[in-house]
Image: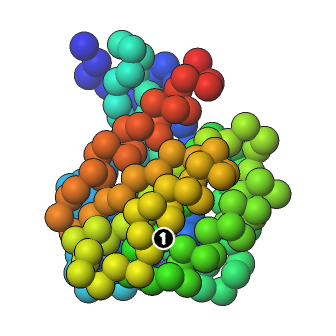
Amino acid sequence: SYSSEEEYDYLFKVVLIGDSGVGKTNLMTRYTNNEFDLNSKTTIGVEFSSKTVKIDEKIIKLQIWDTAGQERYRTITSAYYKGAVGAVLVFDITKYQSFESCENWIKEVRENAPPNITITLVGNKSDLGHIRAVSNEKASTFARKFGLTFFETSALNNTNVEKAFFDHFNDIYQSNK
Ligand code: GDP
């Protein structure tokens, strides 16, 4: 058992990336605090949330970083990517443009983050299937082409959020242990 939050076997820094408004902040708060905010306002500046998970009896401390709106100004700094072992690339299944941006986001990660970074693709807002603009098949094909794992999630309904993050951390663990 572990009582102290300071005791851990691994520390993983993971960054959230993707266009503004796709749900990055809400995915993070859903995952780390089980909270969702329909009227979330973006604050400027880098923020992260922590959570501890167990994989293979190892205690893994996660630092999940949110861009906190920097992406709107195209000013994501290299400090954001420094030391990151994972990136969760989020698009909004109802906004085709946010899916189209993913290729550029992958390029940006590859240019700025450490070389072996694990990237997971997340199509968020699956609760809005009736106004979907990106098919699951199209996103899956894209993910395969870039060697990424793909999940559809809803931060609103809490669908697949835990699974997407856990799978992401497990991928990181398997390549960093
Ligand atoms: P960010 O700019 O990528 O951090 O996006 P936010 O987390 O601030 O979310 C932008 C907007 O989308 C907010 O109004 C959220 O309430 C909404 N939102 C986020 N996730 C979901 C979701 O899964 N479903 C729906 N319907 N709305 C969402």
Residue 67 visible to an observer of this rendering: no
Residue 177, relative to residue 51: is it above or below?
above
> Residue 167, percent across and down?
41, 37
> Residue 96, percent across and down?
50, 82
- Going 61% across and 25% down the picture, which residue do you hit? 175
Residue that protrudes farthest toward the right in the picture: 111
171 or 134, nearer to the observer:
134
Q: Is residue 31 left or right of residue 150?
A: left
Residue 79 position by quadrant: bottom right
23 or 76, nearer to the observer:
23
The residue to which callout 1 is attached is: 91
Residue 153 position by quadrant: bottom left
- Going 55% across and 84% down the picture, which residue do you hit? 97
Q: Is residue 75 left or right of residue 174?
A: right
95 or 54, nearer to the observer:
95
Mark 1 lies on a secondary structure that is: strand
